[in-house]
């Protein structure tokens, strides 16, 4: 039996236009909407895959406001078992704070009798892109950690992890319990069924408060660089543009004259 | 005081992003430039470091490190090199390795780390500009640790030789790797069936395909033009999400960041996520049926038309 905790973050949808709040301190997601990152969607899918057909559980955890329950329930809708909301003002937290909040929740669950063999996180958050919460969490819990993982198999108390390295697919074998940060690409994210959505509405989500003291992220302000005016030169239309396009390729020196 | 740069090795040389990081770190004017290399540095790596102005290359050759990449063990090497160099600033390339290793250093020593930095506004206190939201926004942030850690966004600067080369003395570190730091170590590397992300990020020409390809069978022209130009194939996220092409070809926020001399984007609309991965291309040519697509308006050149008509005609013209 494998119990998996998946950590997801409520983040402004990165596919939409980036609009900042008036104070320039955060991305305003009210127009584009909120989501979990592609990496975290993959993490949820991996966790569900790992526990399918077994007694294992998948718990989805988020650190943030009560609005983050939407992201927790989205995970439950695609197969997770339950959720934990660690209530905190996410805007005040830096990566070390988030790692501490998750560690507190993991320890509390352990004291209550539920231990997690694997904690999965996204490789980096869609909004802050800090690349360090998973690693910091592993040190707080004294567990091995591997980053950028796309496939996970569990057998006999060990996990075999696969991720892209510079020379090919790198394979790790780690003892459980462990922490893994997940990179999109190894598993297709699941889409919720009607039944899944119904189940998610009723599934238990425990709310706990983070009791730490925020160190913050060091953020002073955000800016969105203004797009320069278009300077495109339209070479032509359709197949008839081919000779002119090849001339450009020759001018650029990527084909011989 | 000095600045230490983590070097990643590729084909016997310092990788492109490592050479970028060396230039970036040197130009900060934060003291002597040091480098750290895990394993024995090849002559090409020593030459690259010397050219960038490195005065000393710190190395660790524990046999345990030879067995495979282990981020925690690499972090121990970086820590030892930092002590040897008396570095109060450590820079790594903003790659999977660079971000992971510095995150370990940050966690072990309770330090702040800023990822994907594009520029430094001041050294004391350290104030940086770094990419967030996949490069769509910039964050101005303070890194107020006694040792400051940062990874550099790929292609934020071009590698430039130092006005005068450094000594690049190779200095072995006295380090024995703690078995605890090998709990997550690569046990084997499996060859990919086709291509790899390294080839994509290092390619001087990339030919990209998007939803306009129409399906997995629609990339023949993209592949043929990439082959003809000696380049690599890159794709948009929708293409990998639909399972048409493998993830290691994905260009964008959750894929590879590329900076080729030429990027030919075919049937790609140019959503923010994709633009984050290709904005550093020197020249962009868009092939798209929609003249108002962001990729077209942001490109240097454009052909308005169906990639399935344009690419065969271009290949004929090149034949």
Image (cartoon, coloured by chain):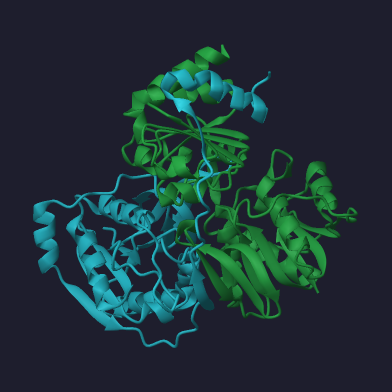
Q: Residue at x 62, y 42 (%)?
A: B282
- Name the foreground residue: B268 vs A150: B268
Percent of width and height locating residue A242 = 50, 20
Q: Residue at x 44, y 73 (%)?
A: A141
| Residue B178 seen in render | no
Quarter of the image holding residue A55?
bottom left
| Residue B34 seen in render | yes
Percent of width and height locating residue A225 = 52, 61
Q: Residue at x 33, y 45 (%)?
A: A187
Residue B285 vs B166, above or below: the answer is above
Q: Colour of chain A?
A: cyan
- Label count reads 0
Percent of width and height locating residue B262 = 59, 35
- Name the foreground residue: B23 vs A205: B23
Q: Residue at x 19, y 50 (%)?
A: A53
The C terminus of chain A lies in which quarter of the figure? Answer: top right
Q: Is residue A79 left or right of residue A4?
A: left
The N terminus of chain A lies in which quarter of the figure? Answer: bottom left
Q: Colour of chain B?
A: green
Residue B309 vs A73, above or below: the answer is above
Residue A256 vs B242, above or below: the answer is above
Residue A96 vs B28, above or below: the answer is below
Percent of width and height locating residue B189 = 54, 40
């Amino acid at each position: 039996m494998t119990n998996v905790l998946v950590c997801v973050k409520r983040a402004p949808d990165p596919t939409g236009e980036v609009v900042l709040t008036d104070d320039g301190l955060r991305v305003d997601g009210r127009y584009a909407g909120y989501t979990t990152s592609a990496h975290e969607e993959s993490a949820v899918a991996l966790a569900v895959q790992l526990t399918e057909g077994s007694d294992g559980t998948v718990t989805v955890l988020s650190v943030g406001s009560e609005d983050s329950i939407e992201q927790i329930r989205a995970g439950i809708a695609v197969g997770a078992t339950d959720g934990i909301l660690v209530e905190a003002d996410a805007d005040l937290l830096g990566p070390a704070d988030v790692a501490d909040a998750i560690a507190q929740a993991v320890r509390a669950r352990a004291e209550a009798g539920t231990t997690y063999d694997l904690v999965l996180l996204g490789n980096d958050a869609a909004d802050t892109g800090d690349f360090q919460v998973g690693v910091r969490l592993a040190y707080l819990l004294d567990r091995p950690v591997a980053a950028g993982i796309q496939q996970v198999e569990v057998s006999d108390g060990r996990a075999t992890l696969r991720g892209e390295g510079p020379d090919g697919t790198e394979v790790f074998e780690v003892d459980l319990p462990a922490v893994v940060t997940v990179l999109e690409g190894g598993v297709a994210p699941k889409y919720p069924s009607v039944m899944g959505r119904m189940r998610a509405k009723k599934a238990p989500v425990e709310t706990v408060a983070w009791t730490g003291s925020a160190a913050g992220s060091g953020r002073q302000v955000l800016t969105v660089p203004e797009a320069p005016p278009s300077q495109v030169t339209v070479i032509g239309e359709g197949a008839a543009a081919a000779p002119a396009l090849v001339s450009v390729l020759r001018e650029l020196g990527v084909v011989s004259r | 005081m000095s600045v230490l740069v983590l070097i990643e090795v590729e084909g016997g040389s310092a990788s492109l992003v490592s050479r970028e990081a060396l230039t970036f770190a040197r130009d900060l004017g934060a003291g002597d430039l040091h480098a750290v290399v895990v394993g024995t540095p090849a002559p090409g790596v020593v030459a690259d470091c010397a050219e960038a102005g490195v005065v000393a290359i710190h190395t660790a050759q524990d046999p345990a490190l030879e067995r495979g990449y282990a981020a925690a063990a690499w972090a121990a090497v970086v820590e030892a090199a930092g002590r040897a160099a008396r570095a109060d600033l450590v820079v790594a390339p903003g790659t999977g390795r660079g971000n992971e290793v510095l995150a370990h250093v940050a966690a072990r020593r309770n330090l702040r780390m800023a990822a994907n930095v594009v520029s430094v506004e001041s050294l004391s206190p350290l104030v940086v500009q770094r990419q967030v939201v996949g490069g769509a926004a910039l964050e101005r942030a303070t890194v107020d640790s006694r040792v400051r850690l940062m990874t550099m966004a790929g292609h934020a600067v071009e590698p430039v030789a130092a006005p005068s080369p450094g000594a690049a003395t190779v200095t072995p570190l006295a380090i024995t790797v703690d078995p605890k730091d090998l709990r997550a170590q690569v046990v084997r590397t499996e060859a990919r069936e086709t291509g790899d992300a390294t080839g994509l990020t290092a390619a001087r020409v990339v030919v990209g395909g998007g939803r306009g390809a129409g399906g997995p069978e629609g990339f023949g022209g993209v592949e043929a033009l990439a082959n003809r130009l000696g380049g690599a194939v890159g794709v948009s996220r929708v293409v990998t999400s639909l399972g048409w092409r493998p993830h290691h070809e994905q260009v964008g926020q959750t894929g590879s960041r590329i900076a080729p001399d030429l990027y030919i984007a075919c049937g790609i609309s140019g959503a923010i996520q994709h633009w984050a991965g290709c904005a550093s291309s020197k020249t962009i040519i868009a092939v798209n049926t929609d003249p108002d697509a962001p990729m077209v308006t942001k490109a240097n050149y454009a052909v308005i038309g169906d990639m399935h008509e344009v690419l065969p005609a271009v290949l004929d013209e090149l034949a």
